[in-house]
Image (tube, helix red, strand yellow):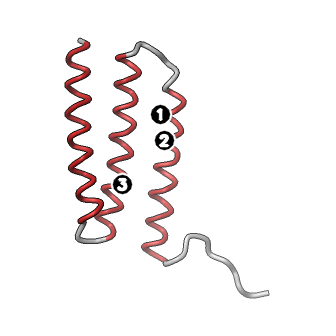
């Protein structure tokens, strides 16, 4: 079982390297945004597999933190791409 986990870690790490190529050479900004979200998911899966391999539950808080940060980042970048601003300020007073 331990060998299977390390093989999965290597495969996910290699796919993360491929996704990094998409982040830097993506044809458009939405493609880069989706690649960043994919990297967040892969990072979460790597930490979960390491948690299983080391037989500990201390990484669960880190997984939750990365998931929240990835979600907030994806929503913020999506809103910025769509509207050009993240926070809409009312200039009328």
Where 42 falls versus 61 (above or below)? below
Task: Report crowding for label 3: few under 14, some 14 to 19, many 20 or more residues within 10 A (C-alpha).
Answer: many
Query: Could you tell which of marks 2 and 3 lies nearer the N-terminus?
Result: 3
The residue most toward the bottom is 92
Return the disc, 1 or 3, that comes first in the chain's sequence.
3
Q: Secondary structure at mark 2?
A: helix
Q: Nearer the viewer, residue 85 or 6?
A: 6
Q: Position of residue 48 (x, y in %)?
A: 39, 27
| Residue found 47% across the figure and 50% down from its top | 71
| Callout 3 secondary element | helix
Instruction: State the CA–CA distance, disc 2 to disc 3.
Output: 12 Å
Mark 1 crowdedness (10 Å alpha carbons): few <14, some 14-19, many ≥20: many
Residue pointed to by mark 3: 36
Left/right of residue 56 with respect to residue 39 in the rendered view: right
Residue at numbered disc 2: 66
Quadrant that contains the C terminus: bottom right
Q: Position of residue 42 (x, y in %)?
A: 33, 40
């Amino acid at each position: 079982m331990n060998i299977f986990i390390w093989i999965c870690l290597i495969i996910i790490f290699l796919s993360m390297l491929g996704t990094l190529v998409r982040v830097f050479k993506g044809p458009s900004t939405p493609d880069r945004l989706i690649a960043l979200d994919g990297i967040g998911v892969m990072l979460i899966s790597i930490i979960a597999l390491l948690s299983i391999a080391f037989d500990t539950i201390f990484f669960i808080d880190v997984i939750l933190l990365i998931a929240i940060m990835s979600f907030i980042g994806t929503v913020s970048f999506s809103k910025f791409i769509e509207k050009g601003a993240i926070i809409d300020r009312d200039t009328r007073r």
